[in-house]
Amino acid sequence: MIATLVLHIAILCSSTSASIIGQKPLAPQPSPTWTPDPLPLVIWHGLGDNYKAEGLRSVGDLAQEVIPGTFTYFVRLDPDPSSDRTATFFGNLTLQIAQVCADLAAHPILSTAPAINAIGFSQGGQFLRAYVERCNKPPVANLITFGSQHNGISQFQNCAATDWVCQGAQGLLRGNTWSDFVQNKLVPAQYFRDPEELEAYLENSNFLADVNNERAFKNETYKQNLMTLEKFVMYLFSEDTTVVPKESSWFSEFNATTGEETKLKDRPIYQEDWLGLKTLDEQNKLEFKLTEGGHMQLTDQLLKDVFNEYLTPKANDG
């Protein structure tokens, strides 16, 4: 579900957008109210995919099969599938997430539901988390992410030796990661995070440093919104070689030089509860799941189990 990073420099050079480091969030939303009816399901796809992809649509069909009556909405940044795919590589994430916030808030079905469930595949997972933090209207009840880069990536994907377009773009990414130009136009660069370049990351990151509340100013709204989740479930693929480091799927930090992994619970982001992850964990609402296989190798049975465990309607105790 995630493609090789093949970037078109012509598109990059013609792309324009304002340099926006943060987005003013809406006020915290209340915890979702459960109903006996299935909540709508929102799915955000990964890098190189598009909202009309057959594999993605089959996930929606499976959700309908397991939980009849489930309405599924596939996040899109452009109605044209090709342009939607391009937007997974190019664009300002602050603007993209603001667009999704507006689209969901205006949707006739989603906006009238008591809450929604959300599944993010690969980079779509951290983008849906940003949706929860920054707007969350309609509110998310259960957030499930698969192979997402919650603590960023420290290495961009490799290109084929004969793919000069990709090789040229990779050179631009690696040599200019922290420039305003790249941070506002190349999506993967906006969640790049190398522990050995932490100072540059904190100063220049257009997206991840903000949504992870890593800067000196802590956005309390991000924390309050994330704590409204009923469940935050993070799946890590055991043989993932696409996401580097794969431990990012669990918010772990990995030092490639020393080979040392610092797990979430040993990091300040958890211990000082910058995002409310510690609070969710103490309420048994934060789950770390390991699944076998490489990046985005999902079976129907795994998805069925997820739907049954986390998306099945629950009666309102009130």
Image (cartoon, grey):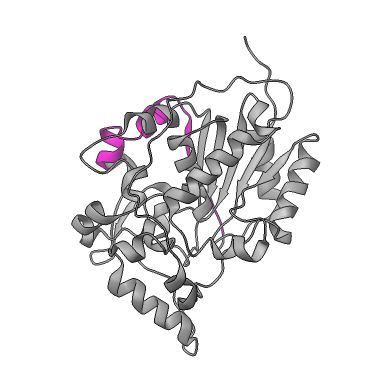
State left or right for residue 91 relative to residue 119.
left
Is 140 rendered above or below residue 32? below
Residue at the far top: name it: 318
Which quadrant of the rendered structure holds the C terminus? Answer: top right
What's the residue at 47%, 34% (across, down)?
Answer: 135
User: 4 and 62: which one is in front?
Assistant: 4
As drawn, 200 above or below 137: below
Q: Is residue 75 magenta?
A: no
Q: Nearer the viewer, residue 216 or 261?
A: 216
Q: Quadrant of residue 87?
A: bottom right
Q: Is residue 276 visible?
A: no
Instruction: Name the one closer to the observer, 310 or 206.
Output: 206
**Residue at position x 28%, y 74% in the image:** 175
| Residue shown at the point (47%, 83%) measured from the top left | 165
Q: Is residue 159 shown left or right of residue 58?
A: left
Instruction: Please give the range of residues in magenta.
Output: 267-292
Is residue 129 visible to us here?
A: yes
Task: Give 64 or 84, whichever is nearer the viewer.
Answer: 84
Residue 274 placement (x, y as % from top left): 30, 35
Task: Give the quarter of the figure containing the N terminus.
Answer: bottom right
- Would residue 286 be counted in the magenta stretch? yes
* Residue 250 picture location, percent across and down: 42, 47
Residue at 49% across, 40% down: 131
